[in-house]
Every structure is written in structure tokens, then in C-alpha cells.
Amino acid sequence: MHKNVKETKMNETQLFILSMQTCQWWNAVFIQAKRFFEILESDHGGTPWDEGNANSMFVAERMFLITALHHAIENLQKLNIELQRNNDNTFQTVLDAIETVASLQDIKNLRDMNEHGLDYLVDKGRKQADFRKTVKKGDYEIHTTAAWTHVHGDAKAILLGTVAIDNLLLIMKSQLPIVKEKTKQIFDKSLYEKQ
């Protein structure tokens, strides 16, 4: 989120829209996660040139999931800033819970590095030094990039880049009722104040 967006105080109409979009993106995360895991479990048909589309759809479903995660969390961060102006820390607890399994910066980097994948492929990315990482899971070291997906049965890890997507989704699922309830409150309050 750009600094000027972070610092700008939102009006009621903007809060109304952002509360709805935040809830939509949180719901989209779980819809997209289902699609991602379904395609992950399917026969990928070898290469993109082989018969079948699972290999290519995997790339698309992965990017859609990363995009949904990014928007869900970034929108929640902005709503959190707005709520904290009124001493309401409801969303800070959600963001803190997410941080127990994935750095918010790592999630942003995952989205940015995939969105600008060509830049990173030719070693010209803005955060090129962060593109290739080693993730330690128990006794295992998993070498990865933001563009890779790892399913490592022995390490019990499913990684999108450095983000343990299985753990992130479990935390987000546990926080979903809080997000839905509070975004609905913001939406309803903004709606009634507009009338």
C-alpha cells in the first residue's frame, strides 16, 4: 500500500465500498484456494505442450490465489488503519494472527514478484535479492523462488514461494468470522449514515 493511501483518511462512502470489497476478497481466497488445490491434485499432463490443460491452469489458479490473498490482506490493513483512528483494534488481532504463520511483507512480495515475473526472470526485479530463498522446515531446507510451488511431504510443507499456504489458509479461515462480522458492521453503519 502506498504511503499516501495509508495516510489518507477515508470518508463514509469509501469505507462502505472497502468493507464490502474486503469481505469479497476474503471469501474469494477460499473459493480460489479450493480451485488451486483441485488443480494441484489433478494430472498435470506433463508439459504445457501435452494434451490436457491442468498444467497451464495450475499457473493461472496459483496466480489468482496469490492475487486474492494480496487484496484480502491489503484491504484489511487499510480498514485496520481506519478503525485504529477510533481506537478499534479488531483487525489488528487478525493481522497479528496472520503474522504468526506468514509475514505480511512476504505475502506482498509474493504477489509483486509474480505480477512482475518477467522482471525477476531476467534478474531485474526491484527486490531481486529476496526472489530466491531457502525455507527451513524441520530438518529440511527447501530452496525456492517466489515463482515456485513446493509440496514437500516429508517436511509437511506446501509453499507458494516462501509462504506456507496451508498454514496461512488455516489461520485466515479461523479469522474469517471476525472479518465478516466487522466488515458487515462497517458496511451497515456506512449505509445507514448515507441515508
Image: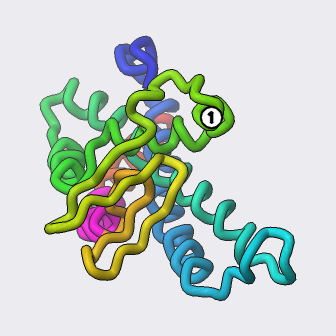
99 or 14, which lies in front? 99
Left or right: where 162 falls relative to 90: right
The x, y position of residue 147, in whole percent, is: 54, 50
Instruction: Judge left or right: residue 41 versus residue 153.
Output: right
Vertical side of 109 occupied by 40: above or below? below
- Could you tell me residue 45's position as x and y percent? 74, 83
Q: Would residue 28 be counted in the magenta stretch? A: no
User: Image quadrant of residue 180?
Assistant: bottom left
* Disc 1 residue type (three-letter): His
Residue placed most toward the observer, 74 or 38: 38
Mark 1: few/some/many CA within 10 Å (<14, 14-19, 20+): few
Residue 194's spot in the image, x, y percent? 49, 35
- From the viewer's perspective, tell me whether residue 26 is left or right of residue 80: right
The residues colored magenta run 167-180
Please name the colour scheme applied to the rendered image: rainbow
At horizontal 22% and vertical 51% (from top left) the residue drawn is: 94
| Residue 77 placement, left or right of 137 | right
Residue 108 visible in the snapshot: yes
Please give the residue where the numbered disc 1 appears in the rendered image.
116
Q: Is residue 75 visible?
A: no
Residue in view at x 35 percent, y 44 percent: 133
The secondary structure making up most of the magenta span is helix
x then y, percent, for residue 100: 16, 53
- Vertical relation: 123 (above or below) 161: above
Under circle 1, the secondary element is loop
